[in-house]
Image (cartoon, rainbow, N blue to C red):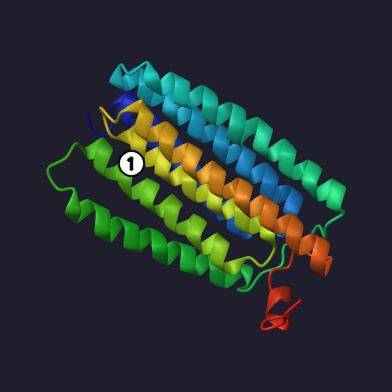
Amino acid sequence: MSFGQLPYDVAHLLGGGVLLFSFVLLYQRRIGAVINAFATQGTLLAIAAAWQGYVQGAPGLYVTAVLALAAKGVLIPLALHAIVRRLDLHRTVETALGIGPSLVAGVGLVGLAILVVLPATEGARALAREDLALALSVVLLGMLMMITRRNAISQVIGLLSLENGLILAAIGVAGMPLVVELSTAALVLMVAVVAGVFAFQIRERFDTLDTGSLEEHRGERR
């Protein structure tokens, strides 16, 4: 499978769309828009999983697609919107690094992913190599979002976006067992639940979800 063939081109288009929305997550300045961008990324990931299931003849990937669409495209975004409304949070995204520098750093991380993955996977199928490069880029951009955003909700979305990259890598490798994909998803979702509980604790004690507030209370004892 190579450039110019429909399965290759569609898989590339969908993987590129997932990566594009990692940049959209970094660019957005409103928390509602960040959540909506994450929902769109999750939907594209679901479509990518379904397409890979068709191309690889792997019915298990259709299960991955349905779960990704239900969780990432619908349920989690609705839950995050509800949290924002319930806690009456600030609708702007607090950043530790400006939007422009974050995007520049993101481009650098994509270049790093390509330089690392393509030489390391020489000899593998072209589609698998490039899917892994796209997936690693999504993972690195998710980590960047967690580091450069001070709002706990944005950091949780960064974690979930990172997990989207892990799933993108798993579905791009032919023969990857479904149990590996599901266990990876379950692990990161459990971490996200813990992060959500942590966010509620921050809100209860400091009346804000800006994690920078923790610095002011470092070393205090109750």
| Front position in the image: 7 or 129 | 129
Q: Residue at x 19, y 36 (%)?
A: 125
| Front position in the image: 41 or 107 | 41
Q: Quadrant of residue 101?
A: bottom right
Looking at the image, residue 171 lies above or below residue 216: above
Q: Quadrant of the N terminus?
A: top left
What secondary structure is found at the residue carrying circle 1?
helix
Query: Circle 1 is placed at which residue position?
Result: 131
Regarding residue 21, the answer to whether it shows in the image is: no
Q: Residue furthest front?
A: 222
Q: Quadrant of residue 4?
A: top left
Question: Can you give x and y, in whole percent of width and height, for residue 184 in the image?
Answer: 42, 40
Regarding residue 16, the answer to whether it shows in the image is: yes
Q: Quadrant of the C terminus?
A: bottom right
Question: Can you give x and y, in whole percent of width and height, for residue 199 in the image?
Answer: 71, 57
Q: Residue at x 56, y 40 (%)?
A: 41
